[in-house]
Image (cartoon, rainbow, N blue to C red):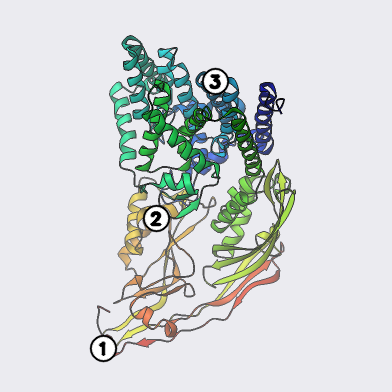
Amino acid sequence: MDKVFNQKTLTFFICLLIFFQLFQILYFEKSFFLEPYDYAYWKNRFEHSQWRLPLSQRVIGDDGLYSYVGYQLVQGASPDFVNAETPPLGKYLIGLSIKIFRSPAYYALFFGLGSLLLFYLLARRLTNNLTALFLTAILFLEPLFFTQFWKAWLDIGQLFFLLANLFFLFSSPVLAGIFLGLFSVSKMPLLLPIIFGLETIYFLVKGQKRQYLIFLLGILVAVLLVYDRYFLLGHSLADFLRLQKYMVGFYQQSQLKTHWGAIWQVLFTGRFPDVSSGVLGPVAEWWLLWPILTATGIIMALKTMLTRGISLVWRGLGLFILLGLLAYTFIPVYPRYLLIIWPFFVLLVGYALKMVERKRAILLGGVILLASFTRAFLFLLPAPDLVLNNFYYNLSHQYFQDIYEENLSKESRPVGNRDEFWRISQGVLGQATVRAIEVKEKERKISRLGNKGEIKLRLTYKTQDLGPFSEEKTIKLVKEANQWKIIWDWNILLNGFLPDYQIGVEIVSGKRGAIISLKEGILVQDSPGYLISVKPNEVDPQKEEALLKLIGKLGGLSGVVLYNAYQENILPETTVSLVTLPILPDDKIIKDLLSYQGLALTKYPARVYNGLSPTDIENTFYDEHYTRIYSRYNFRGIRGPEKQFDDLLYGYDGGKILMKNERGENIGVILEKEAKKGQDIVLPAENESRNI
């Protein structure tokens, strides 16, 4: 038994666990390190994301944003060219990783390992070598920490600078100041006032006023060095101060809702209320050790405050945890923000172990290590949910370029490049007038330990004029570089489709019934009207704002909505339909519209109003966020007489959607529907009012 508790044996065992943890990170996440950064793709993704189009649903996450911006920064861009509310150092480092290693993942790996080494050195200074190794292993096996080792997030760099600041705080004030300065400009330093205040107290209590001035000088030098490019581009100190004010103001005026106490839900229940919606969702990294470690850390932090004879360093760590949690209680946070606090929870566990008898402490520590390693392995073991959820989202929004880049197995990519795949896939669904796709998973046969799997889906395609149709799909998956990927089959797009095929649509007109007033005649009816379309690459940028304002006024949509409609995800050279006019325009309106380059005005079935509101019917079959194109099938009454008599008024177009081979021959009917004519309604006398 004594051999089991031998210090050399325990040291070897812990080092072995640390080695295996590093091995399984590199093994399971190797695709992040092997995949070269595709600047062209991420530039396109950024330009069509919420950062350029506020309403875009083709969102780009923080890792994608920081990688793109970081690469721009190392190419010479000014720190304020975009995402200026986030300090630049972390983005510089990510960009440097891309430039040197062709991947942002190496930034994360280097700063992750650096943080681990600094944590060990700090823990050894505060405890002893064996305890420091144990605490280092606990931290390394924590998903909140090791998930930072391959993602281009700013948190791991900021943690590195904080740990370096603390390590040098006791020996080199200038280095401690430099690293705190780097901490402050690597990511928005939410806890900087607490850290700076505690370290100021440390210097004052120690009576080290001269060292404190050197410490302050180090902070100033680090901040100015990081912004040297900003100054070299001609910005003044006043510009720099205004930029700092903008950063603070951005977060103060943020529209993100603060869910008071959300951080405690995260720590003790693993549930996180979304910052925007408030809907509770699971925290993927959470497990049973979180509430245990949190409770232990808080108790030990309080003990350092209340017990005499405790060193100033332990008191400072305890106070930092308590004040940090208090701050996170009252501001909008994400679970990964806990990374800055978590290592100090772990350190206080080491403080608690000093109070436990040695053999019991070793047994308890062994159980924690084995449980942590098992949890880390299961967490890293590839799960299909991430790729499937992303695939479903991309498919439902028809982001085929993102499917090609993010979701498909490289071995099964069907055509030579991403743009060709996008052109074929989105083009054929455009020919079929598919405006939305609903994805429903019916069955899943995937073993996490296996290398292949399949799912069965039901896709419901919602068309512009003929309503929905559904198809059953069997989709195969394969592990590629230890990540689940989709094996592409053109049947995923449409059953029986091949890249050379085309889609034809034949429409037989139906109609929605008219609403008639005995006093005022026809209030609303289906009529030959007008459709406004735009060819984006022909629009004059200098007149675009006026064009959008005019279309918006006529169609009841805002300019920013219309702009998003033809910029978010449109194939080159495509003409984008925007609005069917709810009125019959006079010659002046027609002349005004046609005076704008890139605009087309064509005959199109419309619902024309003269006495009722054009918003009494809406598209009720799919979300039409950015356009308003009248469809007899999809538009139903939502208020007033349109709703009251909807069952009688309802009529729709009929026709066929046909699949054609490369010779233009019809080879199958995808959808066929009979046209229906709705009834005209004469309003009862009691409803004879413009205020219906």
What separation in Å lies between label 1 and label 3 (alpha carbons)? 87 Å
Question: What SS does tag 2 mark?
Answer: helix
Q: Residues within 10 Å of mark 3 (few under 14, many from 20)?
A: some
* Image location (x, y in percent) of residue 144: 54, 38
Describe residue 19's horizontal placement relative to residue 315 as left or right: right
Q: Is residue 598 visible?
A: no
Check contact, mark 1 vs mark 2: CB within 8 A. Answer: no
Q: Earlier in the sequence, mark 3 or mark 2?
A: 3
Q: Which residue is mark 2?
A: 561
Q: Earlier in the sequence, mark 1 or mark 3?
A: 3
* Image location (x, y in percent) of residue 484: 68, 47
Which label belongs to residue 620?
Answer: none
**On screen, 59 above or below 77?**
below
Q: Amino acid at mark 1?
A: Glu
Q: Amino acid at mark 3?
A: Arg
Q: Which residue is mark 3?
A: 124
Q: Amino acid at mark 2?
A: Val
Q: Residues within 10 Å of mark 2 (few under 14, many from 20)?
A: some
Between tags 1 and 3, which lies in front?
Answer: 3
**On screen, 220 above or below 265?**
above
Task: Out of 104 and 365, give the one closest to the viewer.
Answer: 365
Check contact, mark 1 vs mark 3: CB within 8 A. Answer: no
Describe residue 546's horizontal placement relative to residue 475 as left or right: left
